[in-house]
Amino acid sequence: MSTFSLDPGPDQLAVRDWLHGFAADVMRPAAAEWDEREETPWPVIQEAAKLGIYSLDFYAQQFFDPSGVGIPIAMEELFWGDAGLGLAITGTTLAAVAVLANGTDEQIGTWAPQMFGTPEDVKLAAFCSSEPDAGSDVSALRTRAVYDEAKDEWVINGTKTWATNGGIAHVHVVVATVDPELGARGQASFVVPPGTPGLSQGQKFKKHGIRASHTAEVVLDGVRVPGSCLLGGKEKLDERLARAREGARKGGKNAAMATFEASRPAVGAQAIGIARAAYEVALDYAKTRVQFGRPIIDNQGVAFQLADMKTRIDAARLLVWRASWMAATNQPFTSAEGSMSKLYAGETAKYVTSQAMQLLGGNGFTREYPVERMHRDSAIYTVFEGTSEIQRLVIARAISGMPIR
Ligand SMILES: Cc1cc2nc3c(=O)[nH]c(=O)nc-3n(C[C@H](O)[C@H](O)[C@H](O)COP(=O)(O)OP(=O)(O)OC[C@H]3O[C@@H](n4cnc5c(N)ncnc54)[C@H](O)[C@@H]3O)c2cc1C
């Protein structure tokens, strides 16, 4: 009997339907307002927390789904509701995944629950890696963490930028360099606990899209955190640095690569949610808008556009599900399949939302219809979590084995 199947199981379908209800009933009606206000949509996050959608338990359950598709299904549904609100609800998971991937059991137990708070007292978390001079080139981070052995504390100095939830988060996870000579392999991640002196928010960015999600600079000025805030612990870091020094001489690979490959499909799934939402609006519109005495979809030129949109969305989903399944079942990403899925899904969201605007004519250009917002929101999906160019670079290196620049 064949074991191959693309059918989500009953549990996954139940989660999908539950989230779809939340996306349709709570997110959709609130989306335009929060996009205009460009503020953190606390009432929506609180409602998600009350229902258990914004909770550590929920994400942990999806994260550990053995098929791998729990997270992509959840992301697609929430971002079908709205991308700005979706990121406001899921932005914390970036920091949570960093703790899950790098932290000890004790650190996970201490920090992961604090990142979400409780339904009565909701909290957010932020993952701070990017810097003004280190975006695509993560090896160029300047934020420095220095160990103060006498006090068993780390002292962190630097400026982070583009941090989702930066400055408004309860818990910040900060990537800093501990040995600049080792580039990306000389870096470590630190938890900065709530209320730590020296951490402050810099400018909050006014953005083109996903405007309900808070994005800001984070300034770290003499921030002191206990030794226990180094994710993974000092012993493991020292071993890793020793291996990296050895690896540097042998030209070894960056261990962080595998983690990125595994998390990228989730971001691809968000892009698919936006694309599917815009496609549905365009399909309905094309069937009902009458010009020259017939619905515009009666024109092959229009119908074929919709056929291409739907085909690309489904292809993107298949790539995302494949990469998610590979990550969950520990298959090696020999062709950078995680990057492939994010690249294709991000580009698809931009393509589909742009086509949808065109199909809606003048209405597509107004804020009376949601496709212009979806188009603005989609634009970030070829930029964050690795730009499309960086995904191509990663794929090209993986398939060729060459140090392509
Ligand atoms: C809304 C938003 C939210 C974000 N959230 C977070 C967050 O929570 N935490 C965080 O740490 N970061 C976050 N980021 C940062 C994001 O990951 C970076 O913006 C992204 O990695 C690109 O870096 P950059 O903006 O410095 O662009 P650059 O790296 O300067 O790139 C500029 C252009 O050059 C191209 N380019 C660069 N190098 C190459 C190359 N080798 N080959 C070909 N082309 C190249 C890029 O593809 C791009 O088109 C966020 C960004 C935004 C806008």
Image (cartoon, rainbow, N blue to C red):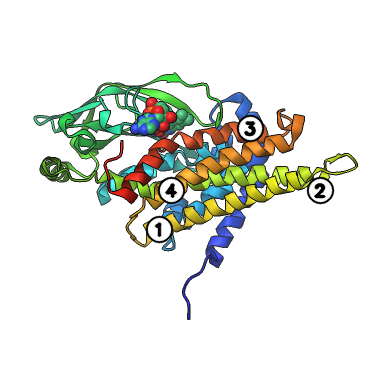
Is 6 situated left or right of 145 in this image? right
How packed mark 4 is, by other alpha carbons closer than 10 Å (few <14, some 14-19, many 20 or more), is: many
The residues tagged by marks 3 and 4 sit, at their Cα atoms, a distance apart of: 26 Å
Residue position marked by numbered label 3 in the rendering: 373
The dot on residue 340 is 4
Q: Can the viewer see residue 164 in this picture?
A: no
How packed mark 1 is, by other alpha carbons closer than 10 Å (few <14, some 14-19, many 20 or more), is: few
Amino acid type at circle 2 is Asp
Amino acid type at circle 4 is Met
Say whether disc 1 or disc 3 marks the residue closer to the N-terminus: 1
Q: For residue 85, what is the image quadrant?
A: top right
- Dots 3, 4 in contact, CB < 8 A: no
Amino acid type at circle 3 is Arg
Is 211 situated left or right of 342 in this image? right
Q: Position of residue 211 (x, y in %)?
A: 55, 28
Secondary structure beneath disc 1?
loop
Residue position marked by numbered label 1 in the rendering: 64
The residue that appears at 34% across and 27% down in the rendered structure is 195
